[in-house]
Image (cartoon, rainbow, N blue to C red):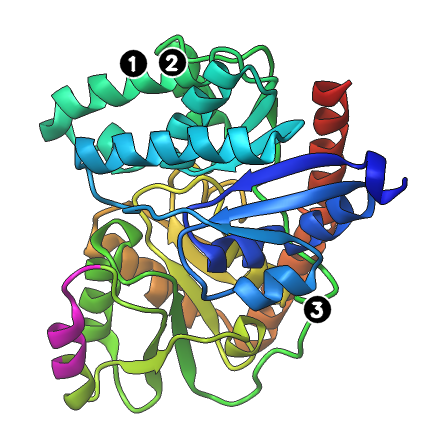
Amino acid sequence: MSELVRKKILFLSNFSVGLYSFYAEFLLELVKDYQVFCAIPDNAKENELRDLGCEIVFTPMSRRGMNPLEDYKLYRNYLRLLKDIAPDAVISYTVKPNIYGGLACRKRRIPYLATVSGLGSVFHDKSKSFVKNMVICLYRSAVKKAACVFFQNTENQEVFTHYRIKGKKSRLVFGTGVNLRTFRMEPYPKDDKFRFLFVGRVMKEKGIDEFLAAAEALASENVRFQIVGFCEEDYQDKLDRMEVRGLIDQLGFSHNVQEVYLNASAVILPSYHEGLSTVLMEASSTGRPVIAADVAGCREVFDDGHTGFGCIKGDSDSLIQAIKKFMAVPLAERALMGRKAREKMGKEFDREKVISAYLEEIKAAIE
């Protein structure tokens, strides 16, 4: 397709690192046939996104804030962006781009596709009922005309159905899938140490309190608890104190996350809620068993007792017992759990299948 007649796709993102990490292969497919614009609020992955063939437009955003004035500014920015670029279709994911991007697309009468990659804390915090009702109303209006709303787990899909939040069509996909070539099967560690790895944003809703409680109870010379990621909430002082005591290892933020899984005995994610956990998919694809909360977005990724173990969300004792159960499994059987995890990713979570689903819906929306 010649450059002159290529249609335009606009991707609305709340974080360039997430956009690049989860959607790079999808963007590569899009640029083959479309002129692709990425609206991002930061420049952390600007160069990498440009290298994929995308054009970058900076759109300031408070990712987690709930300031009505700031959110209205975001909506106005999206309206201007749609007028300037005049895209043929818009793709969004995460709450704010879905809501304010969806509202802007409705006003401009531009086809759009939204991805519900998790419900956010407001749906889970009973003390925020007023805010929850407001978000439901906004979401209901934002996706009403959406060509397709993608869901990453059935529980999120059922919540939207319960609150009568629906677009013209909905479709279930396995998160963003996992790149089986990038996260290739790796040999399981053969030494006698246990290394339990937490990968992600250090925040309460990711289960960091339970992870740290497990480290307090079980850490020793042969049992290490390691953290890869950055603090999104005020945990740094506590992490530093625990590291000084020898209870945890802070490995920092990694731009080559596939390497951090290599020495892990298991990857732990006691998250309170997920869309569909990319970390668990990546770890499983690498051949690592997982220990995760039995919640939507996590439970789909592992088979309890076969590729990992589940625990009760928000319950540190349950996590500790799951870790102890894992530690009682002989080395050869732990390695077998990792191989089974890899097989499950190949059968159910191949990213190429997810990309095909998105391309199909984009083509239908534009035509």
Q: Which residue is mark 3?
A: 184
Q: Nearer the viewer, residue 192 or 30?
A: 30
Whether residue 239 is in magenta: the answer is yes
Q: Which residue is mark 1?
A: 137
Asked whether the viewer can see residue 359, the reply is yes
**Vertical relation: 161 (above or below) 185:** above
Residue behind mark 2:
140
Residue 353: percent from the left, percent from the top?
75, 41
**Mark 2 crowdedness (10 Å alpha carbons): few <14, some 14-19, many ≥20:** many
Q: Is residue 350 visible?
A: no
Q: Is residue 109 above or below residue 89?
A: above
Amino acid on which the number 1 mark rests in the picture: Cys
> Which residue is at a point 75% across and 64% down the rendered structure image?
181
Disc 1 is placed on an element classified as helix
Q: Quadrant of the N terminus?
A: top right
Question: Real-space Cα distance between discs 2 and 1?
Answer: 5 Å
Q: Position of residue 333 (x, y in %)?
A: 58, 69
Give left or right: position of 50 versus 99: right
Q: Is residue 364 left or right of residue 279?
A: right
Please, is residue 351 above or below residue 94 in the view? below
Residue 141 coordinates in the image, percent (x, y) = 39, 12
Q: Is residue 305 left or right of residue 178?
A: left
Disc 1 vs disc 3: which is toward the camera?
Answer: 1
Disc 1 crowd rating (10 Å Cα; few below 14, some 14-19, many 20+) is some
Magenta-tinted stretch:
233-241
- The verdict on residue 266 being magenta is no
The amino acid on which the numbered mark 3 sits, given as a three-letter code, is Arg
Mark with earlier residue (1, 3): 1
Amino acid identity at mark 2: Arg
Numbered circle sitting on residue 362: none
